Image: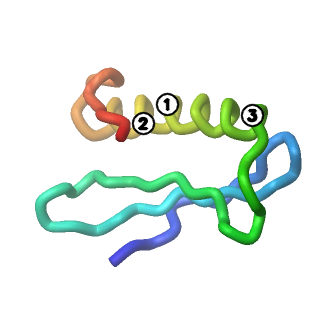
Amino acid sequence: MHEIAEKFALSSGKGRTLYHIRRDMIPDYYLLSFPRDSGEPSPADLSEMLVFGMARAQSLARVRVGDPGAFSVL
């Protein structure tokens, strides 16, 4: 099961979505997604997504366990 945690637009105007994936064994599992209908992301879009993903992971880790470095990116 999943729910949309956040929708946002990149500088290019293309929309992206952060999903919160609900799993028993991994309570804080998120997926950052490029919609299929948007085609492949440009290098600039990909770079912006990676920066956003890392910043969001640090923020979530800080809130959850008090340590902004306590996260993994797959």
Marked residue nearer the N-terminal end (3 or 1): 3
- Identify residue for label 2: 57
Viewer-side residue, 42 vs 32:
42
Task: Give the secondary structure at mark 2.
Answer: helix
Estimate the x, y position of residue 68 in percent, counting from the top left.
35, 24
Nearer to the camera, 2 or 61: 2
**SS of the residue at dot 3?**
helix
Which quarter of the rendering shows the C terminus? top left
Up-down relation of residue 68 to residue 71 (above or below): above
Q: Amino acid at mark 1?
A: Met
26 up-or-down from 70: above or below: below
Q: Residue furthest left?
A: 25
Tag 3: amino acid: Pro
Of the residues under marks 2 and 3, which one precedes in the sequence? 3
The residue located at (12%, 60%) in the rendering is: 25
| Residue at the image position 30 percent from the left and 32 percent from the top | 71
Provide the secondary structure element on which disc 1 rests: helix
Task: Classify 10 Å Cα crowding around label 2: few (below 14), some (14-19), many (20 and above).
Answer: many
Disc on res. 54: 1
- Using the image, determine if residue 7 lies above or below residue 50: below
- Three-letter amino acid code of the residue under disc 2: Ala
Pick the quarter of the image with the N terminus: bottom left
**Numbered disc in front, either 2 or 3:** 3
